[in-house]
Image: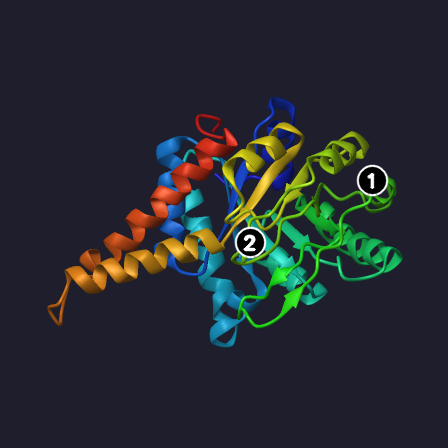
């Protein structure tokens, strides 16, 4: 069943666990995420990125949203369909038209006032439709998806957080405490003391982007101190690559069945998904 981000994160904050949020691009990824979440009885957030949605002349919007909506209609599982890192108001409009239950508008590179105004505009569009809004304050840096450009982190300031939430009325807030997007060149060291201050100042659930590759003990500490949503993408891509290599080794025939081709990918991804669900404490919360 499709639910809003606010519904799953409010429950997570109250009961001190976090909900895994996975970016996906294809049906093999979506099916593996959803089936594994159902196996573990975990709520799950299915995230899509602008660049993937706009692929194929914009057909990604139809395919990716359609896969999740069709599955959610049959699964007795809280599923959020979430637009991840939207940079354009036009993308938010499209997501609302297609039945997304949550959108994230990323104004984290903007000055505080402009970030507030952008988030306010999205909230004004989304809330009347019952759709949740996530925003970001501070900036989670790291490598871009092409692995060619790097951005530095800007830690979230507790003094700004309360003002931002009050002025924007966002439903969840991504904060910067030391993670980074993409694959880490060296292990991060999360600023848990800063997180404690942020959680104390926040009226809404907090989100941690850049969850792939962060050591398990730091993820546990972050969840304990208020993180309610963990974004995961690179770990799934790495798992898929392991699966591709296994497929190449196992299947030398020129016409293997699709099931045989995809199975190693699915197995590798499912192992990662199970680990994240157990790590965040979301198993049996559905």
Query: Would you say 111 lies left or right of 141 here?
Result: right
What residue is shown at x 51% (from left), y 66% (from top)? 52
Question: Mark 1 or 2 closer to N-term?
Answer: 1
Spot occupied by residue 86 in the image (x, y as percentages of width and height): 65, 60
- Report the mark closest to the observer, 1 or 2: 2
Spot occupied by residue 12 in the image (x, y as percentages of width and height): 60, 29
* Residue assigned mark 1: 158
Along the viewing direction, whichever of 211 and 285 lies nearer the viewer: 211
Along the viewing direction, whichever of 184 and 1 lies nearer the viewer: 184
Characterize the local packing of mark 1: few (<14), some (14-19) or many (20 or more) Cα atoms within 10 angstroms.
some
Picture layout, residue 234 above or below residue 87: above
The outermost residue toward the left is 253
* Residue assigned mark 2: 186
Spot occupied by residue 241 in the image (x, y as percentages of width and height): 35, 60
What residue is shown at x 83% (from left), y 40% (from top)? 158
Residue at mark 1 to residue at mark 2: CA–CA distance: 26 Å
Query: Would you say 248 lies left or right of 223 here?
Result: left
Characterize the local packing of mark 2: few (<14), some (14-19) or many (20 or more) Cα atoms within 10 angstroms.
few
Query: Would you say 268 lies left or right of 122 here?
Result: left
Q: Is residue 7 visible?
A: no
The outermost residue toward the top is 15
What residue is shown at x 40% (from left), y 56% (from top)? 238
Q: What number is the disc on residue 139?
A: none
The outermost residue toward the front is 186
**Helix, strand or loop at mark 2:** loop
Picture layout, residue 201 above or below residue 35: above
Spot occupied by residue 212 in the image (x, y as percentages of width and height): 51, 49
Q: Is residue 156 visible?
A: yes
**Helix, strand or loop at mark 1:** helix
Could you tell me if the residues under marks 1 and 2 are in contact, i.e. CB atoms within 8 Å? Answer: no
């Amino acid at each position: 069943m499709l639910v809003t981000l606010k519904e799953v994160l409010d429950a997570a904050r109250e009961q001190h666990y976090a909900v895994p949020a996975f970016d996906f691009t294809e049906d093999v990824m979506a099916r593996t995420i959803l089936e594994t979440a159902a196996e573990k009885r975990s709520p799950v957030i299915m995230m899509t990125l602008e660049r993937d949605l706009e692929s194929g002349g914009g057909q990604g919007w139809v395919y990716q949203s359609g896969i999740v909506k069709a599955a959610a209609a049959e699964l007795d599982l809280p599923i959020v369909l979430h637009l991840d890192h939207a940079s354009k108001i036009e993308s938010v409009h499209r997501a609302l038209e297609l039945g997304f239950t949550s959108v994230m508008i990323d104004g984290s590179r903007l000055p505080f006032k402009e970030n507030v105004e952008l988030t306010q505009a999205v909230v004004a569009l989304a809330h009347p439709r019952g759709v949740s809004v996530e925003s970001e304050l501070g900036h989670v840096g790291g490598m871009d998806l092409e692995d060619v450009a790097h951005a530095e982190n800007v830690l979230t300031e507790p003094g700004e957080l309360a003002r931002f939430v009050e002025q924007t009325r966002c439903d969840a807030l991504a904060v910067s405490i030391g993670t980074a997007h993409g694959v880490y060149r060296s292990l991060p060291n999360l600023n848990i003391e800063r997180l404690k201050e942020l959680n104390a100042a926040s009226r809404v659930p907090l989100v941690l982007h850049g969850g792939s590759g962060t050591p398990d003990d730091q993820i546990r500490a972050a969840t304990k101190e208020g993180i309610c949503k963990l974004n995961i993408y690179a770990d799934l891509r790495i798992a898929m690559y392991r699966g591709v290599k296994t497929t190449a080794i196992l299947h030398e025939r020129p016409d293997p069945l699709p099931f045989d081709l995809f199975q190693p990918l699915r197995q590798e991804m499912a192992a990662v998904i199970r680990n994240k669900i157990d790590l965040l404490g979301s198993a049996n919360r559905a």
